[in-house]
């Protein structure tokens, strides 16, 4: 299966997302694979056997969201300089969303920009993070606040990599799948409710539809000036959850699941989503072992952190809200009192 990416406002940007067995790849240039210690042990040799290049190097970094920093990017850059990569060289991201984001960002910086390819090894990165050219790192103020829109040359999605994925990581990817269905496609949501993700055909179909939906959005709006912001459903609240827990308690998809619960509660409060529809989404998250609760310690502090979200502008918070299941609405006029009323539903309770 091939899902083409062709950015409407950039005729020079075309690439394919290939959902199939990893192909043989030949590069008449220097290539550096960027991966982490965990993925390297599992999949590096598989990838190396598929690559023919003038020279092939491997850059291995520590595993974990806490290493998604400018310091790590600088360490990758230093290794690229040590190996004397040039402007025709290529980076290959082998790993999940953290590796993909950092490799893409590093590629955008090295000698003002070199090519890179995504080989995502987690469900979350296969259905979302590897597609669309968002790259970046975290800092103490929030998630992905330093970065660039920088498109890969290709994305190769092979579900064989998912066989070694821990169950918790797999569930985290499902949070990004359900995001696409709730925002854009009720029929897809209904399909997901009865799909068996242990079945290769069902899994590939789910990945394909998620990538197709994301491709449609990215093709229209590469740099998130409009509809692409809808892909952040659940992320505005979820990023605060990650920040408050220092990126150590929850996987990204788990934080997104909590964020979905919070934004759905806000949608119910605004009469954009029925309680019955919210219950359907909640049941799906529970079925796939995703967290649906979070104990907010201080509502005012949590609320203030929302303003670090990249969508916030002119001191206004922008929320991506579901309109039922299969529709969406962007609002920046919701009263502070309404937002805090919803956040109070998640306030830490004294025992």
Image: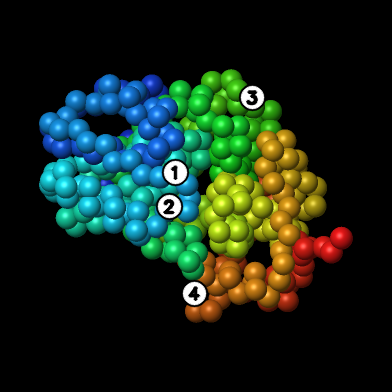
* Nearer the camera: disc 1 or disc 4: 1
Q: Which residue is mark 1?
A: 63
Counting residues from the start of the chain, the first of labels 1 and 4 encountered is 1
Residue at left offset 56%, top offset 44%: 176
Residue occupying image coordinates x 55% and y 27% = 203
Q: Secondary structure at mark 3?
A: loop
The CA span between labels 4 and 3 is 41 Å
- Local secondary structure at mark 2: helix
Label 4: few (<14), some or many (≥20) within 10 Å?
A: few
Mark 2 = which residue? 67
Residue 340 appearing in the image: yes
Q: Judge whether residue 220 can be spotted in this image.
A: no
Q: Mark 1 against mark 3, which lies toward the viewer? A: 1
Q: Earlier in the sequence, mark 2 or mark 3?
A: 2
Q: Quadrant of the C terminus?
A: bottom right
Q: CA distance from mark 2 to mark 3?
A: 34 Å
Q: Which residue is mark 3?
A: 196
Q: CA distance from mark 2 to mark 1?
A: 7 Å
Separation of disc 1 and disc 4 at Cα?
Answer: 33 Å
Which numbered disc, 4 or 3, marks the residue that appears first in the sequence?
A: 3
Nearest to the eye among marks 2 and 3: give it: 2
| Discs 2, 1 touching: Cβ within 8 Å | yes
* Residue 1 figure quarter: top left
Quadrant position of residue 94 = top left
Q: Is residue 351 above or below residue 301?
A: above
Task: Locate residue 96, reporting x and y percent.
Answer: 44, 40
């Amino acid at each position: 299966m091939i899902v083409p990416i062709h950015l409407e406002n950039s005729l020079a940007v075309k690439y394919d997302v290939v959902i199939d067995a990893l192909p043989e790849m030949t590069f008449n240039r220097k290539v550096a694979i960027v991966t982490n210690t965990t993925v390297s042990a599992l999949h590096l040799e598989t990838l190396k056997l598929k690559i023919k290049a003038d020279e092939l190097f491997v850059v291995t970094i520590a595993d974990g969201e806490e290493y998604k920093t400018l310091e790590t990017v600088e360490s990758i850059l230093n290794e690229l300089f040590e190996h004397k990569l040039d402007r025709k060289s290529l980076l290959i991201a082998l790993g999940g969303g953290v590796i993909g984001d950092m490799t893409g960002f590093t590629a955008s910086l090295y000698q003002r920009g070199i090519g890179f390819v995504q080989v995502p090894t987690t469900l979350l990165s296969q259905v979302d993070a590897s597609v669309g050219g968002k790259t970046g790192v975290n800092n103490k103020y929030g998630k992905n606040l330093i970065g660039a829109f920088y498109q890969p040359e290709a994305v190769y999605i092979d579900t064989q990599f998912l066989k070694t994925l821990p169950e918790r990581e797999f569930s985290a990817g499902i949070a990004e799948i359900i995001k696409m269905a709730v925002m854009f496609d009720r029929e897809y949501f209904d399909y997901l409710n009865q799909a068996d993700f242990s079945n290769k055909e069902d899994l590939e179909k789910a990945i394909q539809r998620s990538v197709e939906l994301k491709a449609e959005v990215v093709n229209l709006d590469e740099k998130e000036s409009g509809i692409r912001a809808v892909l952040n459903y659940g992320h505005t609240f979820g990023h605060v959850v990650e920040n408050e827990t220092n990126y150590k308690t929850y996987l990204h998809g788990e934080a997104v699941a909590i964020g979905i619960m919070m934004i759905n509660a806000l949608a119910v409060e605004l009469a954009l989503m029925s309680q019955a529809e919210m219950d359907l989404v909640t049941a799906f998250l529970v079925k796939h072992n995703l967290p649906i609760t979070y104990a907010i310690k201080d509502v005012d502090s949590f609320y203030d952190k929302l303003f670090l979200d990249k969508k916030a502008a002119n001191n206004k918070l922008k929320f991506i809200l579901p309109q039922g299941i299969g529709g969406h609405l962007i609002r920046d006029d919701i009263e502070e009192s309404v937002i805090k009323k919803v956040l109070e539903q998640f306030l830490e309770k004294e025992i």
